[in-house]
């Protein structure tokens, strides 16, 4: 081996040993340094730190909040209603040494411990209380947002009393679970119920009841609408009859006035020359009785022939 190769190998060894002699700590991390499996120190100060290469081992843990999201599970309430409960939590490692001794370096083991502790605590509290306790916090009256539901609720009032409430149930879940997690160097910051839903069988029944209630409301609106429609149609027919009656009365009044005026004018006109009136009436009779195909045999003394005789002689 020549000198250059030896120097290159020596430099590589120095670099590797140097890299193995230092480690960095992020602001969101904490490091447990062990020597042959025994804890030597805990480093929380961010920056570059030194350790004995090959012998000391730096194990990094997060010191900021971590999330836990449980699997939805079916839980019966105290009033025998089966619901699906989905919870989540926030936790953090406050004692990395205890965490290392009890759980180790695999974060999945910590999640398993959380599953084993938080899920039973949530199940215990939900089972010990009625459904209304897990859903509501106070006895405040519900806001009615849908038209028509006010009458429905007045007809079927719902009586309930919230003694504990959802917030207190979540606080008790946190209290029970935190007491068991402290032995692992974990503190539970918060536990919340993310979602509560009926199981499939109960959901179908609830949906059926909701549909029936909505149909009841729709039928109520429909019957009210039909009644209003009949009232409007009745008012329309009444108004139509009244308008027609008034129009007919007015037309008859106008017609009577016109006939009276016409008769008066005729009477005045014919009174000026009664003979002319007789002449006009005779002509009207001629136009009604005679046409181009008519043949008459009249006596010379006939009133009908009298006018023709008079004017033919005059002519």
Image (cartoon, rainbow, N blue to C red):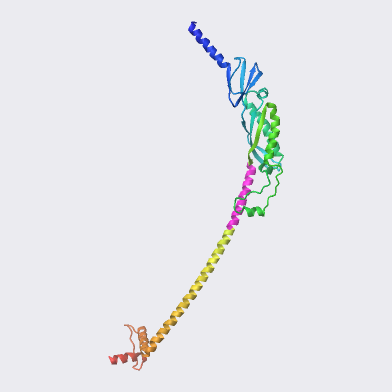
Is 29 located above or below residue 125 in the figure? above
Magenta segment boundaries in residue numbering: 200-222
**In the figure, is residue 134 to the left or right of 261?**
right
Q: Which image quarter is the C terminus in?
A: bottom left
Residue 256 placed where, x, y %?
46, 80
Q: Is residue 66 left or right of residue 310?
A: right
Is residue 205 in the magenta section?
A: yes
Q: Is residue 14 visible?
A: yes
Instruction: Identify which residue is drawn at 64% across, 31% down.
Output: 91
Image vertical order of residue 126 relative to residue 57, above or below: below
As drawn, the residue found furthest toward the bottom would be 301
User: Residue 3 location, x and y as percent?
Assistant: 49, 6
Q: Give the total number of marks visible in the rendering.
A: 0
Say if residue 123 shows up in the picture.
no
> Of helix, strand and loop, which mostly describes the magenta segment?
helix
Residue 59: x %, y % from top left: 62, 21
Q: Residue 283, located in which quarter of the rendered image? A: bottom left
Q: Between residues 147 and 233, which one lies in front from this camera angle?
A: 147
* Residue 115, quarter of the rendered image: top right
> Which residue appears at 64% of the width and 21% of the height?
42
């Amino acid at each position: 081996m020549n000198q250059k190769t030896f120097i290159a190998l020596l430099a590589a060894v120095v670099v590797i040993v140097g890299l193995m002699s230092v480690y960095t700590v992020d602001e969101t991390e904490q490091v447990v340094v062990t020597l042959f499996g025994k804890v030597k120190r805990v480093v929380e100060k961010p920056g570059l730190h030194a350790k004995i290469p090959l012998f000391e081992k730096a194990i990094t843990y997060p010191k900021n909040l971590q999330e836990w999201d449980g699997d939805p599970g079916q839980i019966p309430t105290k009033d025998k209603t089966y619901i699906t409960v989905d919870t989540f939590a926030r936790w953090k490692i406050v004692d990395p040494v205890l965490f290392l001794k009890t759980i180790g370096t695999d974060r999945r083991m910590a999640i398993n411990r959380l599953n084993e502790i938080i899920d039973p605590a949530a199940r215990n509290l939900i089972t010990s209380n009625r459904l209304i306790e897990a859903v509501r916090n106070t006895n405040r009256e519900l806001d009615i947002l849908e038209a028509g539901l006010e009458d429905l609720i007045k007809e079927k009032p719902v009586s309930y009393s919230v003694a504990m409430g959802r917030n207190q149930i979540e606080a008790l879940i946190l209290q029970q679970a935190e007491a068991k997690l402290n032995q692992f160097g974990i503190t539970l910051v918060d536990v919340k119920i993310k979602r509560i839903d009926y199981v499939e069988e109960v959901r179908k029944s609830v949906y059926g009841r909701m549909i029936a209630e909505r149909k009841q409301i729709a039928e109520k609106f429909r019957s009210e609408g039909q009644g209003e429609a009949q009232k409007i149609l009745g008012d329309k027919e009444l108004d139509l009859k009244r308008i027609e009656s008034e129009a007919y009365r007015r037309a008859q009044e106008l017609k009577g006035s016109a006939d009276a005026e016409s008769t008066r004018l005729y009477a005045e006109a014919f009174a000026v020359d009664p003979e002319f009136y007789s002449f006009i009436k005779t002509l009207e009779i001629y136009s009604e009785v005679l046409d181009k195909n008519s043949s008459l045999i009249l006596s010379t003394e006939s009133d009908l022939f009298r006018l023709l005789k008079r004017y033919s002689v005059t002519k």
